[in-house]
Image (cartoon, rainbow, N blue to C red):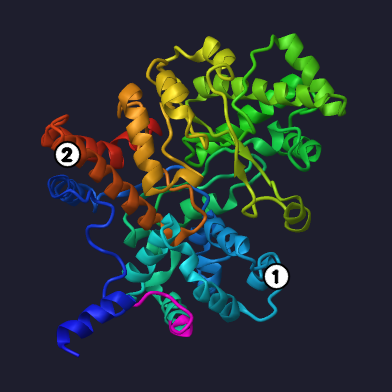
Amino acid sequence: MSDTSVCLSRQRRGTDVALLHEDRLFPAEEGSRAVARRLYELIKDLPIVSPHGHTQARWFARNEPFPDPVKLFVQPDHYVFRMLYSQGMTFEELEIGEDEIEGPREVWRIFATHYYLFRGTPTRLWLDYAFQELFGFTERLNEKNADHYYDTIAAILKTPDFLPRALFDRFGIELLASTDSPLDALGDHAAIRESGWKGRVIPTFRPDPVVDPQHPGFHENVRALGALTGEDTLTWRGYLRALARRREYFKELGATATDHGHPTAMTEDLGDTSAATLFEQVIKGTAYAADLEIFRGQMLTEMARMSLEDGLVMQIHPGSVRNHNAQIFARYGRDMGADIPGPTNYVEALRPLLNRFGNERKLTIILFTLDETTYSRELAPLAGHYPCLKLGPPWWFNDSPEGMRRFRETATETAGFYNTVGFNDDTRAFLSIPARHDVARRTDAAFLGKLVSEHRLDEDEAAELAWELTVGLVRNAYKL
C-alpha cells in the first residue's frame, strides 16, 4: 500500500488526524465559506460571556480537581445520558443516582462503546472539541481506546492546569452565571468573592421553588423563605417583601438577572385584593389546578414589577413538560433528562404583563422558547415591537447548528439582530462551555457570510455584527 493510501485509510478510520475539521459548520459554497472564515477569525478568541448556565459555584469556591472522566463528561450531562438511556442503557449501569458498583471506568467503557450514537448531534461536536482541544486526542473515542482515553483524562485532571479556576482562565471566560434557588445562602459565591480570585462568577435568582405551587415542597419552601427573611410569608404582602429582599441579597453578590422556568408563558394582572385572596387559597391548599396556573401567571407579572424597581433582567423560558417519564421521576427525582418540549402561546399569554409593562424602556425581559414554530409568528413580532422584550438564543434542544440557523433565518427578518441577546450556553457540563460558544460563533459567521455573499450586507457590517453577536449584545442585555 502506498504512503498516500495509508494516509487516506487512517483518515477514513478517524485515526492520527484532528477530530474536528477547521472549516466545520462553514458554508459549502466557497465564496460564503471564505467570508465566514474571515469573520470567524475576528471573533474566535473573544472572551466568553456566559450569563445563563447551570455550573456549580462550589467548583470555583473550593477549586478542587474534578474527580474522574465520568463525573465530568457523562453523569452531569443530560445530553449524554438521555441518549444512552434511549438506546437501552439503564441509570443503574451508568451509576446515575446510585452508589458505585462497578466504578467509573466501567461506566466510561459503556459510554465509549456507544459513542457512535452521537453521530451528527451537537453533543458530538462539544465532546470532540473537549477531547481534541483540552486533552490532545486525535483518534475518535471507541471501545478499543476507552481505557487510554480514561487514563489520560484522569491523569490530566490531577494537574494544576485543570483545576476549575485554571480552566476558567484558560477558556477566556469573562463572566459565568450559575442558577440558584431563592433559599440558597449563596455561601459559595461569597467564598469566591472573599478568596481574592479575579474570576467573575455570579448568581441568578431562580424563584420557581417558591412561586410554583406545584413545585415539590412548595409550602415548606414558602415557610423557609419567611424564616430566611424575617417576613410573614403566609400573608401576600409579607410574601412579596420576602421575595424582594432575597432579590436584593442576590444583587449584593453580583446577580444581574432572574430566571423563570414556568410550564407556560401565561401571565395575569390581578388587582391587589384578588391576588391576596388567590394567594391565601394557594397557601391553604384549597386552590384548583386552574387557579395554580393563574397564580404562576400573576407571579410573572409581580417579578416584572420587581425587575422594573431593582433593575434585574428577567428571563422567561416556558414550554418544557418536565419529568415526563413518571418512573424515572419517582425513583430519581427531577432533572433526569425526561423533559420534553411542548407547544407554547406567547401572544395572548404575555398580553396582561405587556399591557402593564411592555412599553417600559428601563425593563428588560428576555424570552426563550422550545417551540420553534413561534419564532416568526409570535416571538420576533413581539420583540420587534415592545421596548422591554429581547429574544433569547436557541436554547436546550435547539442549541445546535441547525437550531441556530433556523432561529437566525426566521427571527432576523422581523426582530433584526439587535433585539436578540447573543448566545447562552445553558450547561451543567463545564468543559462544554468553550465548545458550545465555538459552535455559536461558527454558525453566526456562516450565516453572516451568506448574507455578504448574497449582497445583503457589506462585509464591514458583518464584522460589526459578528462582534455584537459574540460579546456586545450579551453584555448590553444582561447589564454587564
Q: Is residue 272 above or below residue 36?
A: above
**Quarter containing the C terminus:** top left
Q: Quadrant of residue 166?
A: bottom left
Q: Residue at x 52, y 71 (%)?
A: 114
Q: What kind of element bears circle 2?
A: helix
**Quarter containing the N terminus:** bottom left
Q: Main secondary structure of the magenta part?
A: loop
Q: Residue at x 80, y 15 (%)?
A: 277
- Is 385 in the magenta? no
* Marked residue nearer the N-terminal end (1 or 2): 1
Locate residue 181 relative to residue 131 in the image: left or right: right
Q: Residue at x 69, y 50 (%)?
A: 334
Q: Are marks 1 and 2 in contact (CB under 8 Å)?
A: no
Q: Is residue 394 above or below residue 34?
A: above
Estimate the x, y position of residue 27 in percent, counting from the top left. 23, 48
Locate residue 263 relative to residue 457 in the image: left or right: right
Question: Label 2, on which residue?
Answer: 463
Estimate the x, y position of residue 474 in percent, counting from the top left. 35, 37
Q: Amino acid at mark 1?
A: Glu
Which stretch did the figure color magenta?
A: 138-148
Task: Tell me if mark 1 has few (under 14), some (14-19) or many (20+) residues whose alpha carbon lies within 10 angstroms of its own.
Answer: few
Question: Label 1, on which residue?
Answer: 92
